[in-house]
Image (spheres, helix red, strand yellow):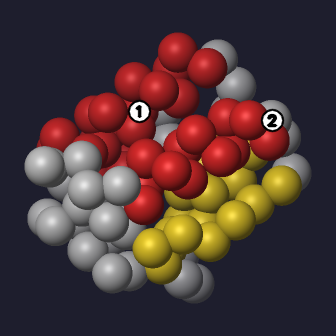
Amino acid sequence: MSSTIVTVGSSVGLHARPAALIAAAVTEAGVPVTLATNGGVPVDAGSALLIMTLGAKCGDDVTVSCDDDAVLRKVADLVAADLDA
């Protein structure tokens, strides 16, 4: 499984709106994607609720993992974007 580390770009972190947008993209892609904070347990990125349990704040590093490189890049870009703007 490929992975990349990205910095959370949303000003409020990975809370309701960013988590919902990321989960929707993962669900639409149809392939497993996980997110994890440094030293944390990976969670299913297809679940907004599980994403919110990470407690990731703006500026925190998150590891995105997926077998599909295109989906990995898309989700990584979403994590890095300010989805609250």
Residue 69, visible in the rendered structure: yes
Q: Amino acid at mark 1?
A: Ala
Q: Quadrant of residue 38?
A: bottom right
User: Left or right: where does residue 77 sit relative to residue 65?
Assistant: left
Pointer 1: residues within 10 angstroms few (<14), some, or many (20+)? many
Q: Secondary structure at mark 2?
A: loop
Real-space Cα separation, disc 2 to disc 1, in angstroms: 16 Å
Sequence-wise first label, 2 or 1: 1
Closer to viewer: mark 2 or mark 1? 2
Q: Which residue is mark 2?
A: 68
Front-lying residue, 4 or 1: 4
Rendering coords of residue 9 (x, y %): 32, 66
Rendering coords of residue 73 (x, y %): 65, 46
The residue shown at (40%, 38%) is 22
Q: Which residue is mark 1?
A: 23
The residue shown at (16%, 67%) is 11
The residue shown at (61%, 20%) is 29
Front-lying residue, 11 or 53: 11
Q: Amino acid at mark 2?
A: Asp
